Image (cartoon, rainbow, N blue to C red):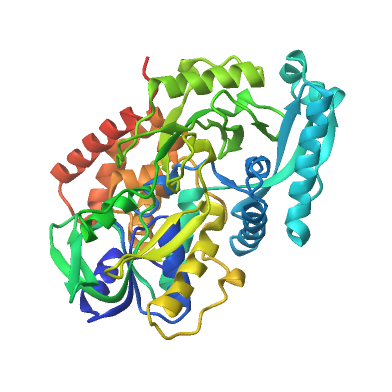
């Protein structure tokens, strides 16, 4: 399925009334678009930036049940996520890896404690289990990861979970939703609501790329903006009180050589109560994450100096590495849409989701995570039928294959200029790639894997994009400069 923006924009303007208009093109919004369109609903989705440009491209790249929730007693949350993990492995075949994760331990009591928890993890997966948890002794750990043995670890538990390319999966969702009739537009911002007799009846929209303003009428409007959803709620009701408590997590990216042995590593206890992952990903190793409460919701969150120091310190202390600031290839930050709770520690706030409606009828979807995007979408669309008066037969997306057109997940962009030119053309004509950031951050993951490389590629990529869009050299120069300024924030400070 081709995603061609001019064609999508034409359809977006022509439809007199939609059944559903979704604001937000991340995992949540795209999942709802697919669920609604597959159920026969006339579905439109708008995204103010690019698909998955927010939190949905800044995850730890895991499709998982969430082992840390076992300690909190959230068995149903883990069980649901494990079931969705297995479905995603099938529906996005070739783009979710069944991957080994090691939890190293130093004491016999810890071996017993984590062993019980991981066997419970296997049990909760039931028929959706990916192999059996196993003990890896000190001899094997010494052969594979000698630095762990040197730190006094007596062995490690090895369990199975999933790994994926988040931005690419989002694109697969967009393509599949379009295949079922959804109309999607990136770089289209919601500016306000159409209201009739006090009820939300549509959305005022601006095309960010051209400045054009228009409106969409819809029977149901959905706020699926993740950490930014409270701002959309205030467009509906200026007196709205925040219902999410944002938390920031950062990841540092290093060359693959820092982690040998083929498995990911998990440290279950850090100083702030979160787990620490070291995950091989697209030829690099991703290390994170932090859990820092934040008061401001920025579209481009920045890693704090203390967060970078925290990850470096923990990686070196607990994983026996000797990482330095100059070893960092990229650093990126993302916000979690945690549902407000009484606890002060954001690491313990809920990752489950909620679906509800405001007095004006705006449907709000909050919380959740990548692994359970499909269940969130399913619950939301069933809410349309039960609470919003839409008549339709819900689809069974649990067995719906996604349109993942690339045979392999894309990492760094092509180095050969002719291959790069072809990649840019395909991204523009079939994947709604409109800017240099769209290409180097999400169509390819260069910005997240090697920010310096991405920065140096900006001029050429911008020129190729301008040729494909029929725009002038001034546009290309502006794009290049904007991206280089952005990429500077993905490089560690000296």
Q: Is residue 411 above or below residue 317?
A: below
Residue 258, x across and y down, in percent: 61, 23
Residue drawn at (52%, 19%), measured in percent from left and top?
Answer: 312
Residue 85, x across and y down, in percent: 63, 56
Residue 164, x across and y down, in percent: 57, 48
Looking at the image, which is closer to me, 66 or 327? 66
Is residue 2 found left or right of 91 in the rendered image? left
Looking at the image, which is closer to me, 70 or 444? 70
Residue drawn at (37%, 42%), measured in percent from left and top?
Answer: 440
Residue drawn at (76%, 42%), measured in percent from left and top?
Answer: 118
Looking at the image, which is closer to me, 167 or 404? 167
Residue 138, x across and y down, in percent: 84, 23
Residue drawn at (43%, 29%), measured in percent from left and top?
Answer: 331
Furthest-front residue in this view: 342
Is residue 249 found left or right of 19 in the rendered image? right
Question: Which quadrant is the N terminus positioned in?
Answer: bottom left
Q: Is residue 411 above or below residue 313?
A: below
Residue 190 is drawn in which quadrant? bottom left
Question: Could you tell me how many numbered marks the image carries?
Answer: 0
Question: Which quadrant is the C terminus positioned in?
Answer: top left
Q: Is residue 369 above or below residue 342?
A: below
């Amino acid at each position: 399925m081709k995603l061609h923006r001019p064609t999508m924009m034409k359809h977006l303007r022509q439809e007199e009334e939609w059944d559903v208009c979704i604001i937000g093109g991340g995992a949540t919004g795209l999942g709802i678009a697919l669920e609604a369109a597959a159920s026969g609903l006339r579905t439109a989705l708008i995204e103010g930036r690019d698909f998955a440009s927010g939190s949905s491209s800044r995850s730890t790249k895991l499709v998982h049940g969430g082992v840390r929730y076992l300690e909190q007693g959230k068995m149903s949350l883990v069980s649901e996520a494990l079931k969705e993990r297995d479905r995603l492995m099938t529906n996005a075949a070739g783009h979710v890896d069944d991957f080994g994760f090691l939890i190293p331990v130093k004491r016999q009591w810890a071996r017993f404690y984590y062993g019980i928890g991981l066997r419970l993890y296997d049990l909760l997966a039931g028929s959706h289990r990916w192999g059996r948890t196993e003990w890896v002794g000190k001899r094997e750990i010494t052969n594979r990861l000698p630095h762990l043995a040197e730190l006094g670890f007596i062995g490690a538990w090895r369990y199975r979970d999933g790994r994926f390319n988040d931005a690419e999966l989002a694109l697969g969702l967009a393509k599949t939703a379009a295949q079922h009739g959804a109309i999607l537009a990136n770089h289209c911002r919601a500016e306000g609501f159409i209201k009739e007799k006090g009820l939300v009846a549509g959305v005022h929209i601006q095309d960010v790329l051209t400045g054009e303003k228009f409106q969409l009428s819809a029977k149901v409007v959905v706020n699926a903006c993740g950490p930014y959803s409270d701002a959309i709620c205030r467009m509906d009701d200026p007196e709205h009180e925040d219902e999410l408590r944002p938390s920031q997590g950062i990841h540092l990216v290093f060359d693959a050589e820092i982690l040998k042995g083929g498995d990911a590593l998990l440290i279950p206890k850090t100083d702030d109560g979160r787990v620490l992952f070291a995950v091989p990903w697209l030829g690099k190793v991703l290390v994170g994450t932090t859990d820092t409460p934040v008061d401001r919701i920025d579209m481009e969150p920045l890693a704090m100096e203390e967060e970078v120091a925290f990850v470096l310190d923990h990686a070196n202390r607990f994983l026996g590495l000797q990482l330095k600031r100059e070893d960092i290839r990229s650093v990126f930050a993302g916000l979690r849409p945690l549902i407000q709770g009484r606890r002060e520690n954001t690491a313990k706030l809920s990752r489950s989701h909620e679906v509800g409606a405001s007095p004006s009828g705006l449907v709000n979807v909050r919380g959740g995570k990548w692994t359970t995007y499909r269940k969130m979408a399913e619950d939301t669309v069933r809410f349309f039928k039960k609470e919003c008066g839409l008549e339709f037969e819900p689809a069974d997306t649990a067995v719906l294959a996604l349109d993942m057109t690339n045979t392999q997940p894309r990492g760094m962009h092509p180095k050969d200029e002719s291959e790069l030119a072809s990649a840019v053309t395909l991204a523009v004509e079939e994947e709604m790639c409109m800017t240099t950031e769209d290409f180097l951050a999400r169509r390819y993951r260069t910005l997240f894997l090697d920010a310096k490389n991405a920065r140096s590629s900006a001029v050429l990529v911008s020129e190729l994009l301008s040729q494909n869009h029929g725009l002038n050299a001034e546009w290309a120069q502006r794009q290049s400069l904007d991206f280089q300024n952005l990429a500077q924030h993905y490089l560690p400070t000296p």
